[in-house]
Amino acid sequence: MTADLSRVDRALVNAFQGGFPVTERPFEPAAAALRERGVDIDADELLARLKHLDDEGTLTRFGALINAEEIGGQATLVAMHAPEDRFDDIAEQVNAHDEVAHNYEREHPHLNMWFVVSVADADRVSEVLAEIERETGQETYNLPKQQEFRVEAKFYVDGPIPDGDVDLTGHGPDVTPTDRETLTPAEVDLVVEIQDGLPLTATPYRDVAETIGQDTEWVLETIKRFDAEGKVRRVGVIPNHYALGYTENGMTVWDVPDEVVDEVGPAIASLGFVTHCYERPRHEGVWPYNFFAMTHGRSEAESERRVEQVRERMAEFWDVDEDDWDTLFSTQILKKTGIRLDERARANTAADD
């Protein structure tokens, strides 16, 4: 572990990767929940410790983790080959596109560059990929998500509350989810304001409300409703998993028989160390895999054990051959700006709202 965490710090990281209260003064019930679990802390100290963890880079942010796909637009995973002698130049060309959010170099004999394209208009994906192909002279392979089985990137550390079982979502206003897909202009303002996190103050939701010119109660109700609707995946601390020692990032890919994908997906998603789990398309002659499961480990040995556990679970559903799967470890982060929601949210604003 690279971060030097106290016992209290470890409790905070474990307890609040989700389920943080959405109330005007959330740190008071949060601190009370920790005291009930044997961690002696008050609201002021809890806020101070979170500020420290944020300043030290142990957290990437604190607040609501927005589900970009539910806000509007589209994101897709793309693979391509970048020849070794032109790798840096191609990375620069790809990264120059604002629509490219994440870009990683991964270990693979051919497809060694993997990036995410995020756009407000789904038709824009093909345009961006055509531009990249024209600029780089390399073919791109679009791998849009066909089924999502799990997105739960939580990273626990040794210490109090090791299973992160603090859920304070019952605090705050009662809300009723809607089936409305578009956003109002006020909701767009809220999404844009909180996408990089909440302010680390005693009254974060009230401060957001003042910034966007809304009532505090409206902000509380909207964030809680977004959580219930899936527009927000969770509210809490978002750790920097590298700072917590999770340095081994393995993307396992599998050629799962089509007839068992619907069974395999939930089974692999049930493994707590699998943070992302999807079905994606194959590309004949180039990419034979249709199932992706992302694992993280704090050492190469731990990562290998987890990959083996995925393989063992897969083998419960079909006869897995060595040619049926691979693991692509990331060797370099080429770009990581996060998916920008401004354009996507505004494009999904109802004209009459």
Image (spheres, rainbow, N blue to C red):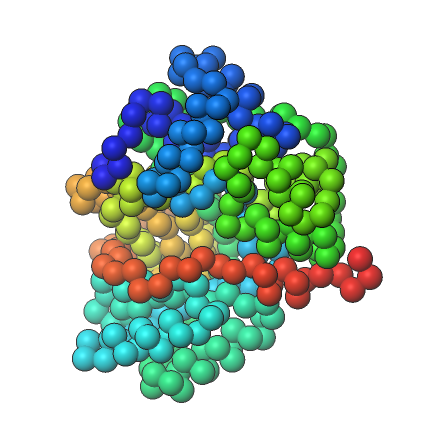
Q: Position of residue 155 (x, y in %)?
A: 36, 37
Does residue 222 lie above or below 251 as drawn? above
Q: Which quadrant holds the N terminus? A: top left
Does residue 85 lie above or below 280 as drawn? below
Q: Position of residue 349 (x, y in %)?
A: 71, 61
Q: Residue at x 60, y 54 (%)?
A: 192
In this view of the protein, which residue sits in the foreground, 122 or 198? 198
In this view of the protein, which residue sits in the foreground, 303 or 219? 219
Q: Position of residue 331 (x, y in %)?
A: 23, 59
Q: Quadrant of residue 329?
A: bottom left
Does residue 233 lie above or below 70 as drawn? above
Residue 14 in sight from this viewpoint: no
Q: Which quadrant holds the C terminus? A: bottom right
Q: Residue at x 60, y 70 (%)?
A: 121
Does residue 16 lie above or below 317 as drawn? above
Q: Quadrant of residue 216?
A: top right
